[in-house]
């Protein structure tokens, strides 16, 4: 009987440890995705600043070009990082925003302001990024600390809490 009890206890402990590791790995991936999106945003803002500073006449090797080239290279690298590490839904809006920035930096404008040309792509990218990262955070929210009616704290491992009421045991709600 002791053997069965010990074996069951060990299995439960192993499952709990595996769930903890999976949750930690998911949280690390989410943090990496956030860092990648922030890096893309940083390079996008730098490229936008370069586009605003673009002279009407420029040549390869002048001061503006020496500023623009590293900014655009960084933007391309950050775009590839987003495509590599982030959910697939974010790829198309990232690429569209990067292409719009590339055109704004290297090509003469068509008479509209730079903000008018870039704002739709920027807004779409930011909206998709917010949705993508919020979905990731909901999926990784597999641990929740709940307070029961008697004042004790319980840790529910593997319980999904996605801003939905916990109907089965309402006394566990904080």
Image (cartoon, rainbow, N blue to C red):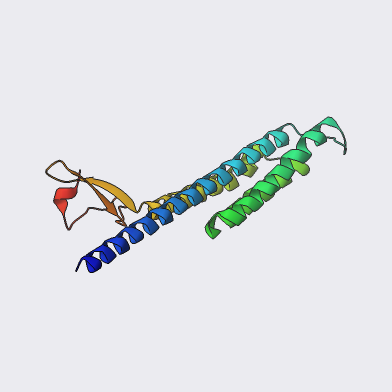
Q: Is residue 3 above or below residue 113?
A: below
Position of 57 compared to 70: left or right? right
Q: Is residue 48 above or below residue 78?
A: above
Name the residue at 73% across, 43% down.
Answer: 72
Quadrant (top left/top right/bottom left/bottom right) for the C terminus: top left
Position of 59 compared to 138: left or right? right
Q: Quadrant of residue 51?
A: top right
Residue 85 % position (x, y) = 57, 54
What is the number of callouts on the image?
Answer: 0
- 119 and 41: which is toward the camera: 41
Query: Is residue 96 in sight in this rendering?
Result: no
Position of 90 compared to 75: left or right? left
Name the residue at 29% across, 49% down.
Answer: 144
- 157 and 39: which is toward the camera: 157
Name the residue at 45% across, 53% down.
Answer: 26
Position of 110 compared to 2: left or right? right
Query: Is residue 99 in sight in this rendering?
Result: yes
Q: Quadrant of residue 3?
A: bottom left
- 167 and 110: which is toward the camera: 167
Q: Residue furthest front?
A: 2
Q: Residue furthest left?
A: 150
Q: Is residue 144 above or below residue 115?
A: below
Residue 111 % position (x, y) = 72, 40
Quadrant (top left/top right/bottom left/bottom right) for the N terminus: bottom left
Q: Is residue 47 above or below residue 15?
A: above
Name the residue at 70% across, 48% down.
Answer: 76
Residue 173 % position (x, y) = 19, 47
């Amino acid at each position: 009987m002791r053997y069965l009890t010990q074996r069951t206890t060990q299995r439960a402990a192993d499952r709990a440890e595996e769930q903890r590791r999976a949750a930690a790995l998911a949280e690390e991936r989410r943090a990496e995705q956030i860092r990648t999106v922030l890096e893309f945003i940083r390079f996008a803002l730098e490229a936008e600043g370069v586009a605003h500073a673009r002279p009407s006449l420029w040549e390869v090797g002048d001061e503006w070009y020496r500023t623009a080239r590293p900014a655009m290279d960084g933007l391309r690298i950050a775009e590839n990082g987003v495509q590599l590490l982030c959910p697939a839904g974010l790829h198309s809006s990232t690429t569209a925003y990067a292409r719009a920035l590339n055109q704004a930096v290297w090509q003469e404008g068509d008479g509209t302001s730079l903000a008018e040309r870039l704002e739709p792509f920027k807004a779409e990218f930011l909206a998709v990024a917010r949705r993508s990262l919020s979905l990731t955070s909901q999926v990784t929210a597999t641990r929740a600390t709940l307070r029961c009616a008697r004042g004790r704290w319980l840790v529910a491992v593997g319980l999904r809490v996605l801003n939905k009421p916990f109907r089965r045991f309402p006394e566990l709600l904080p």
